[in-house]
Image: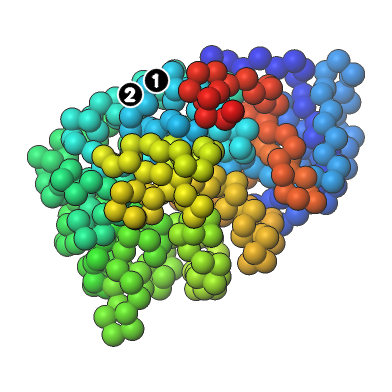
Amino acid sequence: MIPHYDTPWLMITGGDIVLPGGGVLARGTLLINQGKIQEVTDATPASLVLGQNEVTIIDATDCWVTPGLIDQHLHGAFGVDFNQSGLDDIHELLTVLPHKGITTLLPTLITAPKLDLLVSLAKLEEVIQNQVPHQARIFGIHLEGPFLNPEYRGAHPAEDLLRLTENNLEGLISPSLKRLTLAPELDPTGEFIRAFRQDNILCSIGHSGADYVTAMTACKAGATCATHLFNAMGRLDHRNPGILVASLVNDEMYVELIADGHHLSPPVVEMTLKTKPFEKTILISDCNALTGMPSGSSFRFGKQSITMKAHGAVNEEGRLAGSTAFITDCVRNIAQWGLLSFPDAVQLATYHPAQHLGATPKLGQIVPGATADLILWHKDDLSISTVFLAGQELPELSPTGKLKMAMA
């Protein structure tokens, strides 16, 4: 479906525009035509004379203007789960997420019986083929498991974990599979990682107790990212460094951080930001179907019931079962904890994941030629004022069905 634009041009002016790398164009102006950014300037362009009926002007005074957020690791929200929910519920969730500032995502599937995973992958492929304007854009699918170390499985059901073999992989490499998280000790020579990279599938290492040599072998074979660093992996041992140290010292490796205040303490986030090259650090939510739901709510996740507690979602074993914070909250946390300026914090959820996923120059940055997925944030409290998807302001949200009950 092709978006309809009320006027050929959109002008957003007066806000502080966050540029790639964290630079800021104070009181800048964006010119947008048919969903694409045409000009980024510090003055109202004199190069284009626009009639009153040809342009919509948005006053962004006292706002930050940033790209829309990219979440490369998200399981669901508002009672909707990408593994289990039906097509209608998933489409409605994709309509709600942009109102939280999330304009691009990789729906993430947790470990499940292989037949169930095949059904979930087919369902997401159908969703991707039928996306409409005002929905968060699916850039690809992230399969987290089933090739994980049982000792570091987190909320993943142990009985559904698989050895990494050609036979077990059969059917799981769906057309839109963009990213796969695996434990590198299941591929000690890096043979499978090299094959995935040849098929343009990004490999992340995680849910792992791999030693340093095995983790570095995975990196050299083509693994690009460490999945939710520190969580569900071997801990720091100063005599026996493992996957954690390998991820920190390898400057080519991206790392994911869940900055919800529960999965990682602020000092650990600060240590990572001081250790890793800035451009290799990515914020994720890892949020699940309980996100946005009231305390005490329960949901089936990884074959167990998970319950919303004060410190997040917990399964029947007492393990943290994903996050219940949106990536929008994580960006605010990084800034409000005083770890980075807000323009720098934004990079961790826009430009950096776009670079990792190969989505630049179209997504994750405000430059001429980029898709005009944009957020206006109030500078005083970092709340969201307005969101634009491909240059269109989001319409008023009117959830129905399951999401209406979840958001009540």
Circle nearer the viewer, 2 or 1:
1
- The reply to whether residue 350 is visible in this rendering is no
Locate residue 149, reporting x and y percent. 21, 57
Of 232 and 129, the residue lying toward us:
232
Residue that appears at 53% across and 39% down: 294
Q: Earlier in the sequence, mark 2 or mark 1?
A: 1
Q: Left or right: 374 with respect to 299?
A: right
Q: Which residue is mark 1?
A: 87
Left or right side of 11 for 46: right
Question: What residue sits 85% from the left and 35% below the top?
Answer: 59
User: At which x and y percent is residue 73?
Assistant: 43, 45
Q: Which residue appears farthest toward the left when viewing the image? A: 167
**Residue 276 — which label?**
none
Quadrant location, the C terminus: top right
Q: Are marks 2 and 1 in contact (CB under 8 Å)?
A: yes
Could you classify mark 1 by the number of other residues whose Cα lies within 10 Å: few (under 14), some (14-19), or many (20 or more)? some
**Amino acid marked by disc 2:** Lys
Q: Which mark is residue 123?
A: 2
